[in-house]
Amino acid sequence: MRIELEKRAGVSRLFTLLSPLLALVLTLLVGAVMFAMLGKNPLDALYAFFVEPLLEVWSLHELAMVSRSVIAPITGISARRGNSPSVRLPDPSCRCFIPTGTRRSSCH
């Protein structure tokens, strides 16, 4: 029996909205189970990770610094893949240079 993948006709709006929430809930559940296996109170541990950093100004500064170091590479990766309208990088398989602002999408 052969299994084949077929492209869907359209994107499911329900799962487009629910998938980030589902990922968050599953992450919290797995984290809670891991802390419980370590013998720690899961609610105290999750509180320390998600609520305590928002309670003091110094913690907010630290959170901003860590977020910056995570967001910067992601921005570069999205620009490299062509998902950013303001930053266009040349296609690595293309040997010609296409200046920014042109509408050509392929090499000549």
Image (cartoon, rainbow, N blue to C red):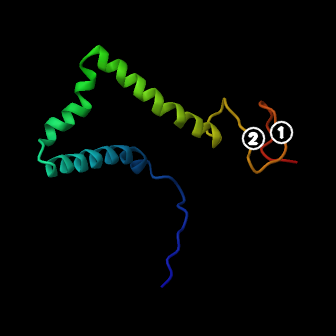
Q: Pointer 2: residues within 10 angstroms few (<14), some, or many (20+)?
A: some
Q: Is residue 91 left or right of residue 33?
A: right
Q: Residue furthest front?
A: 38
Does residue 49 sit above or below 15 in this rendering?
above
| Residue linked to disc 2 | 90
Q: Are marks 1 and 2 in contact (CB under 8 Å)?
A: yes
Residue 59 in the image, given as x and y percentages of width and height: 30, 20
Secondary element at image label 1 = loop
- Residue 61: give its label: none
Q: Residue at 52% x, 31% y: name it.
A: 72
| Residue linked to disc 1 | 97
Secondary element at image label 2 = loop
Q: Is residue 30 left or right of residue 73?
A: left
Q: Is residue 52 left or right of residue 10?
A: left
Nearest to the observer: residue 36 or residue 101: 36
Q: Quadrant of residue 49?
A: top left
Q: Amino acid at mark 1?
A: Phe
Q: Amino acid at mark 2?
A: Pro
Nearest to the observer: residue 4 or residue 36: 36
